[in-house]
Amino acid sequence: MNEPRTVLSSDPAGALKRIGRTLRDRWFTGLTWQGLALVYIVCVLNAMRRSGLFRFSFDESLPALLGMFGLAVIALLPSTLAVVATYNLAPPAPRWRYPAMALAILVASAAGTALMALVESQGRMEFFHRDNLTPLWWVVGTWPRYLVLSALIGVVFVFFRTREESEVATQRAELDRERFAQQMDEARLQMLQAQIEPHFLFNTLANVRRLYQSEPATGETMLDNLMRYLAVALPQMRANDTTIGREAILIESFLTIQRIRMGRRLTFEIDIPETLRDVRIPPLMLLTLVENAIKHGLNPLPEGGQVRVSASVEDSELRIRVADTGQGFTKSSGGGTGLANTRARLAAVYGPAARFALTLNTPRGVIAMICVPWKAGGPATAA
């Protein structure tokens, strides 16, 4: 046996609100108070013409003006509602929408004129017999005037509605373009991340094999740090952001492997306050800067040098620095795919408020600094 279904809503007021929202959103989208005010202005002008406001005294024509205004509203309001509803409900193709609107204007203006005649002639049907016109012929003679007014209302509504839809489409296209550009930046970053310096991995594994033959303890240390490096790096390949703390672990593992390879030629320091370790940033940017410092700064020098990574909040900015004591600026210091990608990533995530700068270190070397706006305890992303 089927259970009885509840037909009546337990919340009549809520049901009425939902019906009202449906009518407004689906049937009468685009019907605004400004648009209705324009229709009322047309009704006022029509009432002034019919009431003889400019031919008689104000006291004599004011009652007629109010009456004619009400009748004009009765005649034109159905056409206005028909225009809006037909535009929203008809298929959007012009070959279907505009003929449907023309038919709706014909029917609604005829109905509005007949309704106006019914209201105006109530109790005094002889009014239509002046000039030997029957009520039917009076409606037929009056209808074209309101048909023209209804058509004008339809043209004005279509003009403003299509302009509004064009602006919305332009805004949506701009948002789609920005979203596509951001997705392209993400795709380029993921392509770079997917590479993860294959020669670095192969060289590290080759060093591990060699060290296990000559220095097993050192080889084990290098293998442990490689596993630690991959454990942090691999999940971040598919992530849109990470934390400074995870980046610090990744950098520490990477630098430990490099120190085993370079020996005493490399020293490093990582200074990340505990209060900033949970701050979220785009992934692998800091690692790119550290790799750049090793490759272009320290490797060319026989004596090597130091890499120092630090983070702080200064002047409403989160500033992350990667400083080295390498050979300083070279032709490739400010270029390269990695640094260009870092700049693009900062612009995509934080907008023009973010900065990336390369400056001279003292007594030598380069400082790569990332600056992003800091607001309410965290970096403020771009809108």
Image (cartoon, grey):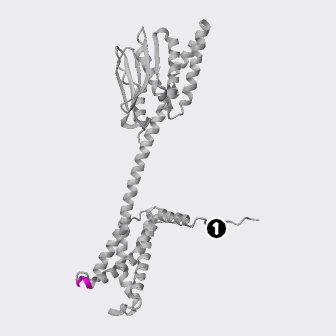
The amino acid pointed to by label 1 is Val
Q: Callout 1 environment at 10 Å: few (<14), some (14 to 19), or many (20+)?
A: few
Residue 348, compared with residue 78, is above or below; it is: above
State the image coordinates of residue 93 (x, y, percent, origin top left): 45, 61
Front in this rendered view, residue 7 or 142? 7
Relative side of 260 to 101, left or right: right
Helix or strand or loop: what does disc 1 sit on? loop
State the image coordinates of residue 2 (x, y, percent, origin top left): 74, 65
Residue 325, compared with residue 250, is above or below; it is: above
Residue 89 appears in the figure? no
Which residue in the rendered view is the most extreme toward the top? 214
Residue 105, compared with residue 62, is above or below; it is: above
Relative side of 343 to 57, left or right: right
Q: In which quarter of the image is the N terminus?
A: bottom right
Relative side of 370 to 208, left or right: left
Residue 218, compared with residue 130, is above or below; it is: above
State the image coordinates of residue 178 (x, y, percent, origin top left): 42, 42
Give, as a single range, the part of the protein colored magenta.
55-59
Front in this rendered view, residue 43 or 130? 43
Q: In which quarter of the image is the C terminus?
A: top left
Q: Name the residue under label 1.
A: 7
Q: In which quarter of the image is residue 302?
A: top left
Query: What residue is shown at x 41% (from left), y 78% (from top)?
Result: 112
Residue 234 appears in the figure? yes
Q: Quadrant of residue 209?
A: top right
Q: How many labels does the image show?
A: 1
Front in this rendered view, residue 224 or 18? 18
Which residue in the rendered view is the most extreme toward the right? 1
Helix, strand or loop for the magenta stretch, by majority: loop
Q: Does residue 121 show up magenta in the picture?
A: no
